[in-house]
Structure formats: C-alpha cells, structure tokens
Image: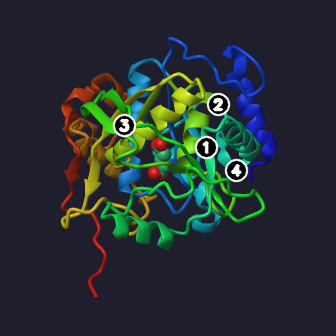
Amino acid sequence: MQSASTGIETSAKHRTSVSAGPDRPAELSPVYRGRFAPSPTGPLHAGSLLAAVGSFLDARVNGGEWLVRMEDLDPPREQPGAAADILRTLELYGLTWDGPVLYQSARTNAYEQIVGDLLSKGLAFRCRCSRSEISAANEAAGRSSGNYPGTCRRLVVPASEEHAVRLRVSDTPVAFTDHAQGPQASVLSDSAGDFVIRRRDGLAAYQLAVVVDDGFQGITDVVRGTDLLDSTPRQLYLQGLLDLPHPRYRHLPVIVTAAGDKLSKQTGATALPRDNPSAMLHKILGLLRHPPPRDLASASPEDLLRWAVTQWDPGRLSGMQHIADPEASELPSG
Ligand code: GLU
C-alpha cells in the first residue's frame, strides 16, 4: 500500500527543476518525460497495454523518462488490489518505469488548494444542479444533453449546500496540433460547457487532477488513446489558467471490438495473460503496426521492447483513431 508520503517523495524527486514556491510544477525541461496513468478500476487488458506500450516506446526512443501515475481518484469505481495488480503486470511485460509511482490519492490537498484558488478568483463556481436538472434545462432549450446549461454560472451557491465546482469556460477556440491526429480545435462553451473540477461527492474530477499532476510531474509528452482526444482542449484550457506548460499530445488509436466499441471492461475485455506475456506483446506490437520479425518469436518481453525501441515510428499510426481487433472480446449476448 502506498501512503501519502509516497506522493510527497515523488514530488520532491521531480521538484529538482521546480522554478518557484510550494507545489509549483516543474518547468518543461528540454528532456522528454512521458507517463502512463492507469485508473485502478480493474486489471490491465489489451487496450490499456497498447496505450502503455505506445507511451513507453515513445519515451524510450526519445531517450526520455517514463513515469507511472496511479489515477486512484475514484474509490467507488476502484477494485481492491487492482493498483498492485497493474504494477505487477507492467513489470511482467517488461514495462519498467522511472522513479516512484505517484498515487493521486495522496494528492488531494494539492487539488483542494487549486480548486479553492480558482473559486476565489471567480474562474470557477459552485453548482448545485443535479444531472436530471441539467438534462431538463437542456431539453427545454433544445440543446445537446452533455453540455452544461449555465444555470449556476451567475448564482452564488452557499458552500454549505451540496454542490459540485465547475470551471467557467470561454467561447474562444482552443486549438492544438496532436502529433498523431493532426490539427484540432474546439470551442469549450459549445462542446463541454463549464465542466466539473470537483464532484458533488467532494472528489477531484479527472480533468483537474490530470492537469495538476501532468504539471506537477513535469510531463512533456502525453501519449494515450484517442478516447481522451476530446478531453484535451479542456486540459489545455485549464493549463492556461493555472499557468502550466502545455505538454505535446499524441493520441494513439484505441482497439475496438468487432461491434466497433472501444475495448474496455464494459465491452468484455479480459485481464492480460500472465503465462505468456511475449505472445501478447507480439500481438500488441503488430496492432501498433510494428510486427516483430519471426526470429523474435521466442524473445522475452524485454528483448521485444528493446527491438521495438529501435523501430518505433509513430508516423505509421498517423490519423488512425481505431484499430479493429477481430479477437477483441465482446460482451456475451443476452
Ligand atoms: N486514467 C485514465 C484512464 O485510465 C487515463 C488518463 C490519461 O492518460 O490522461 O483512462
């Protein structure tokens, strides 16, 4: 088990190049620092392994560091033992990380402080709307249901009332170039709307924690699945408000089942096999358009990854949003 001090030790290590003040993030250094950030909601599966391998190879080919951050922010969705199981699986697959693992559960004070600052500057506001109130307001106005209708934007909701905290977004487009998917642009007020940074249950929201910790750990390069491409404009916007450097982003295709759904626990993904990691790595490298040669048929995971580092050309995946895997699990029907 990790304690709060683990988070602090990690921060101290990576604070060697910090520019100012407590909990100021490291400045982006010219070196490459990547990360894999699993949520311990279950064991790793082929889809999460593909993201891990892609970000690992990209870091190593650039002579960079590769960190692991456990996004254990949401106890109700977590599975006991999953975090330790994920780390054991990464080791078994030869995916060795640099430095200590950062546990987001040890970072709640940092998130709280930042939410408090955003509230006091008027950049965020308390919102008491329930999900059904949001849907009803959107329906009445004929708007898409995912967007926040702005109900509490101009209200002062007392802190004593149950509330979420939302970030005020602007209607200025957020544009960036994704290193795999090309130019992207989004107007947050039309897409996400004012989004939640602290949930009604008091937990920090993913969008806030990921930005705070990418900054805190000095991450220069985020390599992850295209399922998170539409979160990126929110994260860039928040980085701007918090005066954090913007990492480079590369969104790799995600594995989809024969039915076209992203492979996940919900679509029936099974835990990675423990008995023959090399066979699964062969398959993942093939899906990443880097099929290992025949003479590596019996290579260890470490040797396969060493070979893959010498070959890694993420350009082979440019513009690909999905990888169809006919063998990907499907939920049993009925
Ligand atoms: N924890 C997220 C997930 O497991 C990934 C977050 C990220 O890479 O930004 O989907």
Find disc 4 in the rendering and name its residue.
105
* Residue 220 place in picture, x, y as percent: 49, 23
Q: Residue furthest top?
A: 30
Taking 59 as reference, is 254 above or below it? below
Does the rendering let one see residue 110? yes
The residue drawn where x is 74% and y is 58% is: 158
* Residue 276 place in picture, x, y as percent: 39, 55
Taking 179 as reference, is 81 above or below it? below
* Residue 86 place in picture, x, y as percent: 54, 53
Tag 1: residue type? Ala
Name the N-terminal-most of marks 2 and 1. Answer: 2
Residue 141 shown left or right of residue 219 in the figure: left
Instruction: Give the CA separation, mark 2 to mark 4.
Output: 18 Å
Quarter of the figure with the C terminus: bottom left
| Helix, strand or loop status at disc 4 | helix
Name the N-terminal-most of marks 3 and 4. Answer: 3
Of badges 2 and 1, the one in the foreground is 1
Find disc 3 in the rendering and name its residue.
54
